[in-house]
Image (spheres, helix red, strand yellow):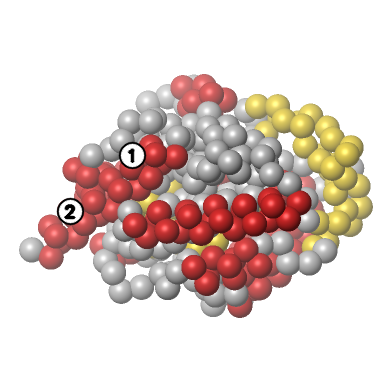
Amino acid sequence: MTTLLPTSTVGSLPKPAWLAKPEVLWSPWELEGDVLVEGKHDALRSAVQEQERRGLDIISDGEQTRQHFVTTFIENLDGVDFENRETVRIRNRYDASVPTVVGAVSRRGPVFVEDAAFLRAQTDRPIKWALPGPMTMIDTLSDRYYGSREKLAWEFATILNDEARELEAAGVDIIQFDEPAFNVFFDEMKDWGIAALERAAEGLRAETAVHICYGYGIKANTDWKATLGSEWRQYEESFPLLQRSSIDIVSLESHHSNVPIDLVELVRGKKVMLGALDVASERIETPEEVADTLRRALQFVDADKLIPSSNCGMAPLPRRVAFDKVSALTAGAALLREELAD
Ligand SMILES: [Zn+2]
């Protein structure tokens, strides 16, 4: 990538109302059968066109073909029972009905590879594909078979690595693992979480990214954030380990967040995908606000390693709001590029 400050989003974008109910996370499909398959492709194509029109440099699928960033992947694995659901507490924050691991987990076949090849065919720009990280997958399940979170994470890491290699072969330039659980389970992250992430990313020629955040702008997350005090230092636990890891890019939230910007220093040497759009507010940032957030980060990351992005996925936002935010992001990055050229 030769553009300075190449812009990207974390991944998910709102779906069209004819495909799934808008402004609801994980909402069920409005279509079924072959019409659903065609509808998902139409939505993906439209998401790509809109990202290009708004000036994004790194294009994603907007997660138009999946209902949930973790369970859609798990649904395609053997060893998991979706009928037999149990209610568990997700990231110590909210209860959710989740599937149960009842046998050895394995991938029945490629999960997202066809969708990624479809995305590849829609654009000449670099493309990024998000997968759930092993630890976040564990936290979205109930396990009645392995009896060890570490063991199950290792199985998932191996499965994710197989999928990632096929995504790479389909032309994906950046493979991103979403690990919001790294902001919650620090001991496990240190014991085996980082190692499992590196196992998932092992041997890839594509660039690899890890996204760690404080979640979508939903009430359970907003309530949790209100308990975290005036300085959110959770990244202090993961960043030094990621700085020494094989992962190329670290994606974090920053704009309107209580994360002290100097924590970016802890991943010095890595590329930084910096959140310059608040996904918990429908207010559209101005280009100047975006540029200001990015500019403050430049004390801690070299300009050629900064990737302007959103704080998290934008799926729950109204469609127009999400895309207007993307326009603000690309305009803000352009302002800073001009400054840097002077
Ligand atoms: Zn996120």
Q: Which residue type does callout 1 highlight? A: His
Give the secondary structure at mark 1: loop
Kind of residue indicated by mark 2? Leu
Q: Is residue 307 visible?
A: no
Query: Which residue is pictured at 81% across the width and 41% down the height?
Result: 99
- Label at residue 255: 1
11 vs 335, left or right, is right
Of marks 2 and 1, which one's residue comes earlier in the chain? Answer: 1
- Give percent across and percent down for residue 48: 46, 59
Q: Quadrant of residue 298?
A: bottom left
Mark 2, residue position: 335
Badge 1 crowding class, 10 Å Cα cut-off, few under 14, some 14 to 19, many 20 or more, is many
Q: Is residue 119 among the parts visible in the rendering?
A: yes
Foreground disc of the pair 2, 1: 2
In the rendered view, tell whether residue 102 sits above or below residue 4.
Answer: above
Instruction: Identify the residue at image location x=23%, y=49%.
Output: 332
